[in-house]
Amino acid sequence: MPIRFFLKQWLMPPGLFLLLLAAGWWLRRRRPRLATACFGLGFAGLWLMSLPLVVQEAARLLETEPALAPEVWTQLAQRADAIVVLGAGRDRGDPAWGGEDQPSAPALERLRYAAQLAKASGLPVLTSGGLHYGSPPSEASLMAQRLQLDFGVTTTWREEASLTTWENAKLSAELLRKQGIHRVVLVTQSWHMQRSRWSFERVGLEVVPAPVGLLGVDHARPFAGLIPESRAVWQNGVLLNEAVGLVGYRLFY
């Protein structure tokens, strides 16, 4: 896992662009033309990754599932038998919570939405997510805890072994089939929904997409979103990682 993590960080932006900048500096005397090309690509890549406009346009390519209209929330029980909310990582040892791990901000966004859907529809909830750092508690357990304490929603099932989106789908499907469930409302980030829906349908479940946290909406930034922002670097990195994952899943699964 550490080697895989290391390679991923340097072969994907922004790590890749930093390597190009370093290569440009290293080659500046021996291969000035190549050095210029490396520097230009590295600089241009970092600049594009920092733009809110790029976030908006890139997200629109990935966010192909429309959001659920609030007026259909109460009708979800006619279309599905359970709500599945996918984990999105966890934050380690937050002192504000007595040193206990907490779901990440994207995970909490998913939980809030899943709670509203569960209250409106009456559908049971499954949380899915394994040991994000290789040690307990699982993401599924943390999410179930926050659903109960923060939103008053009881989790019916926990899938606590998955480490990837594909495993989310495969292991959740195995658990739900034992309950005779084959139709689910799937809650995850909008940019993650394409890959998630593909995975869940691939393992034989019918999916009602319930995306949340759309990035492809109007960025509302001044100067047409062409001023660099640190947040955009992270968002563009997530979107690029998702695009690569979408291709990879179709190749390997």
Image: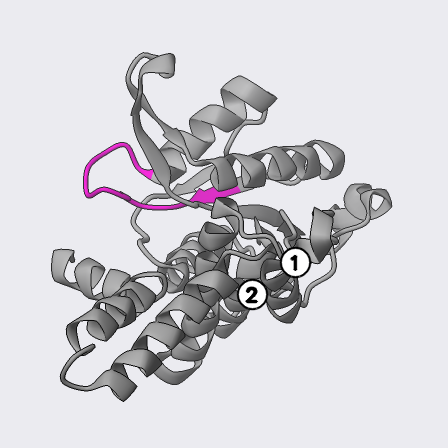
> In the rendered image, which residue does mark 2 sit on?
197
Q: Along the polypeptide, which appears first: circle 2 or circle 1?
A: 2
Q: Residue 239 placed where, x, y %?
A: 50, 62
What secondary structure predominates along the stretch shown in magenta? loop
In the depicted view, which residue is nearer to us: 66 or 123? 66
Q: Residue 223 placed where, x, y %?
A: 71, 53
> In the rendered image, which residue does mark 1 sit on?
209
What numbered label is drawn on residue 139?
none
In the depicted view, which residue is nearer to us: 15 or 102? 15
Q: Are marks 2 and 1 in contact (CB under 8 Å)?
A: yes
Q: Residue 188 placed where, x, y %?
A: 55, 51
Residue 154 position (above or below residue 244): above
Residue 247 position (above or below residue 153): below
Residue 150 position (above or below residue 58): above
Q: Is residue 136 left or right of residue 111?
A: left
Secondary structure under the numbered disc 2 in the rendered image: helix
Q: Amino acid at mark 2?
A: Arg
Residue 136 highlighted magenta (yes or no):
yes
Whether residue 138 is visible, yes or no, is yes
Whether residue 178 is visible, yes or no, is no
